[in-house]
Amino acid sequence: MTNVFKRKEEGIWEPGKPIVAITIGDPAGIGPEIVVKSLFNPKVYAVCRPLIIGDKNVVEQALTLCQKQATINVIQKPWQGTYQQGFIDLIDMQNVDMSKLKKGTVQAMCGRASIDYINKAIELANPKQVDAIATAPINTESIKAAEIDCNCHTEMFGVLTQTKEPLIMFEVRGLRIFFLSQLISLRQACDLVTQERVFDYIIRCTKALESLGVTQGTLAVASLNPRNCEKNASLGDEEIKYIEPAVLEAQARGYHVVGPISVDFVFHKALQGHYHAVLSLHHAQGHVAAKTLDFERTISVTTGLPFLRSSVEHGTAFDIAGQGIASEVGMTEAILAATKYAPYFKAQS
């Protein structure tokens, strides 16, 4: 069931469409523009109540850049929103000096602002005042300029919620992909392909899917080496030594998993519906598969947090920021994904 929120002034509980807190990301990037554009898609208001977290002046600028018109409704609490097409319900953080804002550039002010938006979203999500969070892109260089130690968006959520190693799931056109490792070198990623880790991730991925309401289907574990090493060591032995034993152990414990499945067709088979998700063994495997299929619509869902979070899978695009031409497709997909999974989401213990 979708979470409900309490109208404190009226003393009643009101169920309804999920409230999705949407952060505008780095004010100097395309985040504000794609957030604003996404709100003009009728599908968004049809399925959720979008609550924007950002700076009013930045949002007004984005409306102008995108040649859109809407009434900005500044509120303090989620229950105060109108949530109607033509209105933008906004929690105004008032943290951007427009006289100093330069679109498309690294600025400490913008790095700090983007973190403020994340903090506010978490502040609302922890007590269930919102049902999910959808995030526009931040810029790590801007955040470092603000003297904040952060390597990526997901790491920031992990630190701020004291979550160890949040689990990322990509989704595009029904294809779901998990990752055994993320932003590390390929050499390091190969070293992490151990029986213990693969087995652990089979369990984690299964629980993550269950937390999203996905309980039917089979998880496929991709191979690491070409042609699934053809059951011999000429192309590598990770499949024989680590991956297959992990899969067999998980199967013996009742988990619906198969593998290793040759990486050159496992994603294709999953897209056809043979598997409900794929465990990719390193960053490039899953990223290339998803983004080649449909770059704009590839989004990520972060599980393992106390709340549901979705995000676009592209950056701040400083090269086109401020022109009003950035595509909002990914942002819209992220909002819709948060809405789709919010009624089923259960925080993992």
Image (cartoon, rainbow, N blue to C red):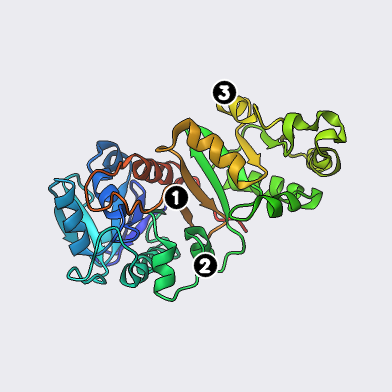
* Amino acid tagged 3: Gln
* Amino acid tagged 1: Ser
Q: Earlier in the sequence, mark 2 or mark 3?
A: 2
Q: Is residue 17 left or right of residue 324?
A: right
- Label 3 sits on residue: 272
Q: Which mark is residue 346?
A: none
Q: Earlier in the sequence, mark 1 or mark 3?
A: 3
Whether pointer 1 and pointer 2 mark residues with C-beta atoms closer than 8 Å, the reply is: no
Q: Is residue 291 above or below residue 117?
A: above
Q: Which mark is residue 310?
A: 1
Q: Element type at marker 2?
A: helix
Q: Is residue 4 left or right of residue 271?
A: left
Q: Element type at marker 1?
A: strand
Q: Earlier in the sequence, mark 1 or mark 2?
A: 2
Classify mark 3: residues with Cα within 10 Å, few (<14), some (14-19) or many (20+): few
Q: Is residue 161 visible?
A: yes
Give the image location of residue 101, x and y in percent: 23, 66
Label 2 and label 3: CA atoms lie apart by: 36 Å
Label 1 and label 3: CA atoms lie apart by: 24 Å
Label 1 and label 2: CA atoms lie apart by: 15 Å
Residue 105 sits in quarter: bottom left
* Amino acid tagged 2: Thr
Q: Is residue 12 left or right of residue 266?
A: left
Q: Is residue 348 above or below residue 246?
A: below
Give the image location of residue 16, x and y in percent: 33, 47
Q: Residue most toward the top? A: 272
Classify mark 1: residues with Cα within 10 Å, few (<14), some (14-19) or many (20+): many
Give the image location of residue 76, x and y in percent: 25, 67
